[in-house]
Amino acid sequence: MDRIVKGFIVTLFGIATTVLTAAGLVYMELHYDCAIYGFVYAFVLPFGAFISGVVAASGYYFGSRLLSFRPGRGVLLNMVAVSGANFFFIYWLKYQYLTVDGEAIRKWISYPAYLTFTLSHTSVTFDQFTRDTVALGFWGYAYAALQIAGFAFGGYCIYKLVRSAPYCDGCGFYLKLKGKQTRYFERLEKLADCLADFRLTTGRGEFRKAMDEHADAGSKMVDDAKGYSAVVEVHECKGCGKQWFDLHAKQRVNKKWHEIAKLRYSTFSSEKVDALEEMTGAA
């Protein structure tokens, strides 16, 4: 299938989820008085719009994975624009369904006038206990711009997610996870040695040996004394069979594992590693 056709179909997926998300948000607002997209933390973090933007743009992700289409900058602009425009679509839907004394407001006022009036009369609640509201006046437009940015950023994050997924440029397929091997360490020095050895051995093209060395470097089981881990994920292209090795280093902080981004390493293999089920260690 032509790349342009795939991009068009992926865009339709994205528009479909955008419309469905907007409809769901408006339904929640009109029937339950809950404007999820309007949730803003400390008046600077539009997390409600961001989450709504991620859900709205999810169609781009699923469409891209389904068609093995890796979006480029053109689709990025499309995703950000559609995600940001969802704000105006939401207000248009409300404009279509709002009534006053049983009469649809669209009979008495145009959409631009309705939008201008609504934004300039935006009120926010600062105290969840007293439920006191404050009218923003002109700052209602800044509040709206913040929400639009939240929607757009949600779309951008979906783009980054689908772009970061392992992909074979030669065959045009996303790679499938075939196996994962995890080893745990008590000291950072041991973790660093493991990573250095893995880089060195894979650099020589000896991927099976690198996996064996990784398996022997640390413990297969985790306990309270082990605060570091090295995880190797192996992905494979269904077209050419090429494998991609992705090494993650993690540190446990307050019982949660956090990736050490600067220590991440990945490479394509020139050697096919079989019997991947032998690589699966503790998660």
Image (spheres, rainbow, N blue to C red):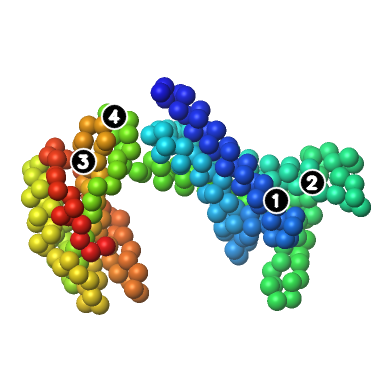
Q: Which residue is mark 3?
A: 243
Q: Are marks 3 and 2 in contact (CB under 8 Å)?
A: no
Disc 2 from disc 1: Cα separation: 9 Å
What is the number of the mark on residue 97? Answer: 2
Find numbered disc 2 in the image and state the secondary structure of the residue it sits on. helix
Disc 4 from disc 2: Cα separation: 48 Å
Please tell me which of labels 1 and 3 falls first in the chain.
1
Residue projecting furthest to the top: 2
Disc 1 from disc 3: Cα separation: 45 Å
Evaluate whether residue 28 shows in this view. yes
Please tell me which of labels 2 and 1 falls first in the chain.
1
Q: Which amino acid type corresponds to the residue marked 2 in the rendered image?
A: Tyr
Nearest to the observer: residue 208 or residue 66: 66
Q: Residue 19 vs residue 94: left or right?
A: left
Nearest to the observer: residue 269 or residue 258: 269
Disc 3 from disc 2: Cα separation: 53 Å
Q: Which amino acid type corresponds to the residue marked 4 in the rendered image?
A: Cys
Q: Which residue is mark 1?
A: 26
Find numbered disc 3 in the image and state the secondary structure of the residue it sits on. strand
Q: Are marks 2 and 1 in contact (CB under 8 Å)?
A: yes
Residue projecting furthest to the right: 101
Please tell me which of labels 4 and 1 falls first in the chain.
1
Find numbered disc 1 in the image and state the secondary structure of the residue it sits on. helix
Where's residue 220, x and y in %?
A: 17, 66
Please tell me which of labels 4 and 3 falls first in the chain.
4
Residue at left offset 58%, top offset 37%: 15
